[in-house]
Every structure is written in structure tokens, then in C-alpha cells.
Image (tube, helix red, strand yellow):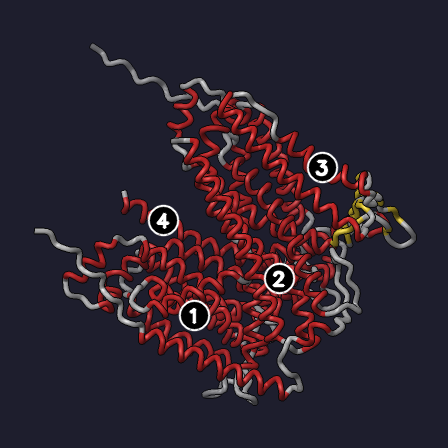
Amino acid sequence: MQHSPPPAARKPPDRLGTVVVALILLALAVLGANIWLNMRGAGVTPGFGFLAQTAGFDLSENLIPYAAKDSYARAILAGLLNTVLLALAGLVLATVVGVLMGLVSVSPSPAGRVVALLYVELFRNLPKILVLLVLYVLAVRGLPPVREALSLGPFHLSNRSIYMPMFEPDPSQIWLLLPLVAGALAAFWWGRRARRIKWETGRELPVMPVAVALLLGLPMAFALLADVPLVPTIPAFERFDFAGGARLSVQFLVVLLTLGLYHGAQIAEVVRGGILAVPTGQVEAARALGLTPRHVTRFVVLPQVLRIVIPPMINQYVNLIKNTSVAIVVGYSDLMSVSGTIINQTFRPLEMMLITMALYLGLSLLASSVMNRLNEALRARSARSAP
Amino acid sequence: MIPAAPPPEQRRDLLRQWAGTPVTALVSALSAALAVWVASAVLDWALVSAVSPLRPMEACAEAAGACWRFYVEKSRFMLFGTYPYAEHWRPALVSVLLLALSGMVGLRITGRLGGVGPRVLLALWVLVIPLVFALMGGGWSGLAPVDMSRWNGMPVLLILSVIAIALAFPLGVALAVLRYQGRWPVLRRVAVVYIEAMRGVPMVTVLFVGVFVLPLTLPPGTRISPVMATLIALIFFHASYFAEDVRGGLQSLPASQTEAAASLGLSWGQTMRLVLLPQALSRSLPALVNSVIGAYKDTSLVVVLGIHDLTSTARMAFSEPGWGQYALEAYAFVGMWFLLSCAFLSWVGRDLHRQQSARSR
């Protein structure tokens, strides 16, 4: 006799949960009412209308044209872009430092291992704020004034800024994004094609050079053909300061260095753990099969290390993005310090913190979802090619 | 037959270790150069060009290195800031109490200090936390009242780290249980949203909410000191990180644990309290210790809000006119403290790790 499967148990409705949520909402309503009363008492009506008002303060630096007469909304946008720039530069620096130190920490050289160990231990046991403050003191004291700036070709470094050559900004340069995206897509397509051809015929096609040529060449060609002005300007010393070119403040450099060193230490630990997790038998077996050391690294060790390392790396990257907010300590105009200034000026902490937290939450969710998707794709691909 | 003598021990080939391949040689050379450069700079600053603490402050004027006399003059200020000088024994006692209690917890979870049960520790916490505030604030049995704005330095660092962590922990466990269970799906969703939102924003923003928005949510006319507001914000922030660590422990438990508890007739509450949580907590201890180290170090971020913890009083110590050149000495003081205290925490973490891998083997 056959038993029919029992019917799925009906879940009782979550009465307790509903009650608790109702209580939470009630508490929030009480708090909201208090906020309303307090703000009215201070002569302010809650709302986001103030964003259109004139900001009236300057930023230490900005990627988009911004002046004190612009609106608060534009100041926030400028701050957000500064945060993004800092985060992107920090990700690159921390990755380079971290991978390098991770590799050195497993190298046969005793000197290298000791240096890597001391570096990791030092930066894992010090608060990032302290690292930042010390580096700031060292930079302001140790770097020369603008008049005696350290120069390396067209690059100059003083205790205020680093100066470098850049293209003269022009509104029409925004169109260069078009060929850049096209170049990226073409490079991606070429990479897939090269892999397929190698899979089918074993013939190796150059990938990296073609990708670089596409990414640089397409925008260049577009600029020439469509007559987008790309006039290089080189910083030159005038009476009191450098003029021309682009500059990054020493505050930016110090925060960048802090993020790079601090997260570099964490990434070094991740990389070290990943490498040590690959059994030595794998390397020995690959050598026994006659693979060259380079091929052992490329085809045996690296894929396994990446698999282990990427999830904690994503974690580190998201932390780094959030930690850019320490920039407020030295006064680099990132999102957090712009929003702190606006709070002091307008007495609108509620609105400003809602905006700021939403933007940071958006940034970290965006970053983690993009990187997680890349990771999934990578896993799916390596699962397919290694049945 | 005479057994063959064992081969002599392999000679450690120094050259091969230091320069087996060109890359290794390069790594060795660069590392050695870096080490020599940093070590000589630090030694020169701290010893060779430094001025000994026995010589008067005036001797520091033209010295290129550290001025250790600065510590004689300023260490009490760096430790306790603007707290009334005659009452310094109170913040000192508070610091010792909090450090001793944290040390006891650290030793207890690594299995030392067997005589002190968890109940005793819990009772001590319940006793010490109000005592800390009473001692610092004063205003009873002859102790002069001291306003919270004058609470500075080490005790503030410890209140904002140790007490925040201690109070965030139970909240974190509760959030972890709520996120893990399936009995009340609405509550579970609330926990998920809370944890993910808190973990998605920087700590500075949460501190700003504590100091600027929290006072607004109080009925008009009531006030809350920035230290209290920060403490509350930190509790809510750290709890979300602890929750994820504990949830990791809960998820690592096999389903058979719940099933066995159910077949013994244990209720949901009993299963959680007697079967799942004790195992989950001991499994999540290494991750928790890591989070504690992070939370402890990040406490110094309160500098941003004008709250004077150790880092901030160190900054104050050289902000007076004429003292500006001693910034590095002041920061070295803070750095030493963090290296020392984090070394203890790291040791606890490593010890737990060792015990766990020994158990799983």
C-alpha cells in the first residue's frame, strides 16, 4: 500500500512578530514626533527643501566644477565623487600592497618573511585613526614647502599637494566615455573569442596587448576624429604656487596611504592564508607532470588560491569603501566631511544623516553585489573548464 | 649486523634560503634594506638623537629625536585629560577595574581561571558597570561631582570600548537568534534588515547619528551627554557585527542537534538555551574575538565627535602653544598602549584557535 505524502504543515501566522513590529513602529513614531517638536523648537521645519539652497563653503578639492555659490545638493555630489575616487585608489593600492606582502610572507627569504610579519602585526594592532594621524604629522613635517617641492619630471610633491600633468578640462570630454565603454566591450569580446579559439585549436592569441590598445586607442581615435579638445597642461611654478595640471591634496594622499597600508595588512593575511591552503602535493604533482614553475603557478596554484581568497577579499573591499569616511579626521572633503559641515551649518542632522547613510549603504551594496556576481561567474567558468 | 647510522641532519643552506632564485634574492635585498632603513630611523629617533627623561624640558628644544621628558610632563594629562587633578584616583581606579574585568573574561574564555564561573563574571559586570559611572560622576558620599564633558582619556576609551562591547554582546546574541530561527518570520526579517543596514554603513555615520540625531529624539527639554550618546550608538553598531559572528556559529551546528533536542521533548526556548547557544557561542569565539579587536581599535574614531578618548587627549597634549613639536611622542604613547592591549586580545584569539583545531582533530 502506498502512502501519500503528508500535506505540508501550515505555518501559523507570526502573531508575536506582527506585535513586535507594531511596537517598533510605535516607538519610531514617538521618536519622530520628538524630532519634529525639537526641530520646530529650534525654528527648523524637517524636509529636504534646503538641498537647493546655497552651500556657501568651499571644498578642499573637487572632481566636478563646484564653488561656494553652488547648492548643498551639488556639494554632496562633489563629496560623494571624492569618496569614490578615494575608494577606487585605495582598492588598487591596498590590493597591490596586500598581494605583494602576502607573497613575500610565504617566500623562502627569511628577511622577507620577518618584514612581512612585522608589517602585518603592526598594522593589525593599531587603530587606523592613529595611523592616519601619525602619517599626517609626518607628511606635514617631512615634506618640503611648495617653493622647494620635490620634483620628478612633471610631477611635484609639496607639503600641500602633489601636482601632475593632466588634460585641460572641457565639457565635451564627457563624450569620451562612449568610446571607452565601446573599447571595454570590444576587449571583453576579444578575450572570449581568444579563449574559444584556444579551446578549439590550441592556438594562443594575444589578449592583454589587444585590450590595452582597444581601451586607449578607441578614445584617442574618437578624440582626433570628433575634435574633442585634449590639451595637456603641465604644472609650472608661478609666484606662490604651481599653476596648471592637476593636483591632489596631501590630505588625500595621507588617507590613501593609510587605507592602503591598513587594508594591505589585512589583504596580506588573506593572501597568505589562501596560498598556504593549497596542499604542497598539488605543486609536487604538477612538477612531476613536467609543468614549468610558471605554469604550475598559473594553472595549478593560482586558480585554487583565487577560489579561497576572493570571498574574504570582497569583504575587505567593502570595509575599505566604508573606511574612506575616516578622511574627515584630516579634512579631506569626502562625503562624510561634507555632510558634517552641512549639519553644522543647517542644523539638519536627521535629513543629512539619512542621505549620507543611504549613499554609503548604496555604495557598499553596489560594490558587494558587483563583486559577488563576478565571483559567481568566475566559479561557474572554472567549474566548466575543469570537469 | 650493525644498523646503518642515520644520515646527518640536513644542513641549512643559508645561501639557498636567502637567494635561491633571482626573485628570492631581490626580495631578501629589498626587505633587508627596508628593515635597516626603518629600524635605523626609529632607533635614531627613539634612542640616539633622543633626550632622556631625566634632562629638563629645555634640552629638547634643539634635539632631532624624541623628547622623553614629554611623558614626565604630560602622561597624566594624556591618561586622564581635564578630569580634576586631585580626583585622578577615580579615573585610575575605573580604568584598573575595567581592565581587570576584561582581562578576567579573556583568561576565562581560554579556559584559564577555572575557579571563576560565568555567573560570577556576569555578577561582576552587573556590579562594575554602574560603579564605573558612579565613580566617574561622583556626587555621592563626599565625592565631588564631575561633569561628563570632563571625562577624558583612558577611562573614556575603556568605557566606550569595554562597556559598549559588553552591552552589545547580549543584543548581538539576541539578533543572531532572531535571524537564525524560523518560527517568527516577521522578526527574522526585522533582524536581517537591521543587521545588514548597520553593517553597510561606516561607523562614523552611526556615531554622528548618536551624537546629533539621538538627542533630537528625546522629549524637548531633556539632554544627553555626547559620551552617553556615543556609548548607545556604539552598542547598536557593534551588536550587528557580533550577531553575524554568533549566527555563523549557529549555522555551523548540525540539524541533528535541534532534532535530538526536540525528540527529548525540549521546548524551543530550552533547545536554544541549553543545546544550541552554548555550542554556537564556543564555536564563534575566535570570530568574536576578531570583532572585539576591531571594535576596540575603532573606538578611537570618536575623536571626530570631539569626545576625548586616549587618542584625543594625546592630541590635546601637544595642541597647546609651544608643545606642537611633540606630536610623535604623544602618538607613540597611544600606539604603545594599543599594541600592548591588542597583543593580549590577539593572544586570546590565537589560543582559542589552537584549542579549536586541537578539538576538531
State the quadrant of the N terminus of chain B.
Answer: top left
> Residue shown at 49%/61% (left/top)?
B199
**Among numbered discs 4 and 2, the one appearing first in the sequence:** 2
Q: CA distance from mark 1 to mark 4?
A: 28 Å
The CA distance from mark 3 to mark 2 is 56 Å
Rendering coords of residue A71 (x, y %): 74, 69
> Could you say whether the residue bearing mark 3 is in a helix, strand or loop?
helix
- The answer to whether marks 3 and 4 mark residues whose Cβ atoms lie closer than 8 Å is no
Q: CA distance from mark 3 to mark 4?
A: 49 Å
Q: Which mark is residue B71?
A: 2
Quickly name the residue at label 3. A216
Query: For the residues tagged 1 and 2, is the chain the same?
Result: yes
Instruction: Tell whether A76 sits left or right of A34.
Output: right
Q: Are marks 3 and 4 on the same chain?
A: no
Q: Chain of mark 1?
A: B
Which quadrant is home to the C terminus of chain B? top left
Residue situated in front as seen by the camera: A164 or A16: A16
Q: Chain of mark 2?
A: B
Spatial distance from mark 1 to mark 2, Cα to Cα?
A: 24 Å
